[in-house]
Amino acid sequence: MAAAIAARQRGMSVVVADGTEPPIDKACGEGLMPETIAALGELGVEIQPDAGYRIRGIRFLQQETQVGAGFPQALGVGIRRTILHQWLIARAEECGVRLMWRTPVSAITKIGVQLPAEFVTSTWIVGADGSGSRVRRWSGLDATARQNQRYATRRHYRVFPWTDHVEIHWGRRAQAYVTPIGREEVCIVVMAMRAVDASVDSMLRDCPQLEQRLSGAGLVSRERGAVTQMHSLRAVHSGNVALVGDASGGVDAITGEGLRLAFRQAIALADAMGRDDLRSYARAHRRLARKPTLMGELLLTLARKEGLRTRSIRILAKRPELFARLLAVHTGGAALGDLLSAGAHLGWRFLTT
Ligand SMILES: Cc1cc2nc3c(=O)[nH]c(=O)nc-3n(C[C@H](O)[C@H](O)[C@H](O)COP(=O)(O)OP(=O)(O)OC[C@H]3O[C@@H](n4cnc5c(N)ncnc54)[C@H](O)[C@@H]3O)c2cc1C
């Protein structure tokens, strides 16, 4: 939807063919960081004032230790994914995108796209078909530079949010990403290296604090599973085909950065198509991926190494200003150099604690 809107905003005529139909649901932490909201704004999608739940920052919790910080620049929003998708559809329709639901793409050629009942000729073909992208395979872009896979499970609980932060609860083998998404609704995603550890029930047993928060709260959606990947490709375009969103690689769900990346890539791709220069898209794509990939690697290292994680969270709890600086870098409120400087401070505390 984002890629279609951005292309229409630059005057191209756009057809979207999706194999399923709305409401399209998917396991997701449903947290929009301030920068994600800014990118949505550039696409002409505004967060409606009474929708979702305003998020002020991020908090890490492990047993009795916790540390949190506010977003430096603006608020984030927790919102049901199906609602966000409705807004994107409404905006795409307003822009004049031709939307075709229940229309799987079965092949692409140099001159267009094969749909069940017609062949659509096209100057550009954008593969926005998710992490298992077939457009990626058909266009020979499957070669990966790196890939690391984890498992996730999502649930929605009917409960009054007890926090206005996204909470990341660190268990021994899994993490729970908790996002308030409504006046009486909270989204929980549990992520782990092994599928068996990505169970909400076993996470709650490991994390009594969270279990207590949810005790007596009813489930208000179907539980969904997903695979989340740190995945980067050697190339994101070939000929007149370009990949965007999860089809073009991605970062682990724990970063909460997937949607921002997809929206920013969509804008960069539309610019590149407008200039008839997909190489500039490849450059922008690499630049956009740099920081979330680094953050993703850091968070996954904490997930894997219990001793390092325990010490890091304890140090950050004693020096919350360091956590605030790391969060500012993560959410786009500070430069990558600040990450190195905050990292150096953290390293120094390690040596001196
Ligand atoms: C567990 C989990 C939690 C996450 N939490 C967050 C979060 O809190 N915040 C955040 O910003 N990001 C989060 N992410 C990342 C985010 O969900 C993804 O980055 C984002 O959804 C990618 O969108 P996409 O449009 O590229 O792919 P998708 O959402 O997968 O969409 C792909 C579309 O392509 C269609 N399609 C596929 N094949 C075909 C075909 N052959 N023909 C026609 N249509 C086809 C599908 O029907 C689908 O509609 C999370 C991811 C996971 C797995």
Image (cartoon, grey):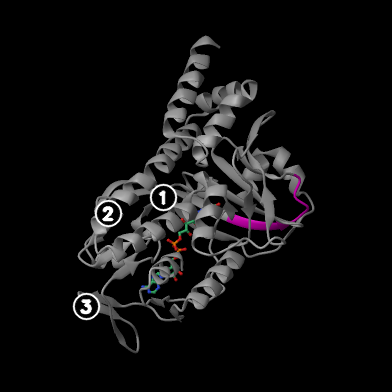
Q: Quadrant of residue 153?
A: bottom right
Which residue corresponds to the image point at 29% horizontal and 71% vertical from the top-left? 125
Mark 3 and ligand 1: say if the CB distance to the nearest ligand atom is below 8 Å: no
Whole-percent x, y for residue 133 in the image:
34, 64
Q: Quadrant of residue 2?
A: bottom left
Query: Dot 1 lies on which element?
Result: strand
Q: CA distance from mark 1 to mark 2?
A: 25 Å
Q: Earlier in the sequence, mark 1 or mark 3?
A: 3
Identify residue type, mark 3. Answer: Ile
Q: CA distance from mark 2 to mark 3?
A: 22 Å
- Callout in the foreground (1, 2): 2
Give the answer, above or below, for where 90 lies relative to 341: below
Q: Earlier in the sequence, mark 1 or mark 2?
A: 1
- Callout in the foreground (1, 3): 3
Q: Which residue is labeled 1 in the image?
A: 229
- Crowd tier of the residue under label 1, counting other residues whose Cα lies within 10 Å: few below 14, some 14–19, many 20 or above: many
Identify residue type, mark 1. Answer: Gln
Magenta-colored span: 154-162
- On the picture, is 227 further left or further right than 286? right
- Callout in the foreground (2, 3): 2
Whole-percent x, y for residue 148 in the image:
37, 45
302 or 332: nearer the eye? 332
- On the picture, is 38 further left or further right than 102? right
Q: Is residue 334 magenta?
A: no
- Is residue 151 among the parts visible in the rendering? yes
Image mark for residue 111: 3
Q: Which residue is labeled 2 in the image?
A: 280
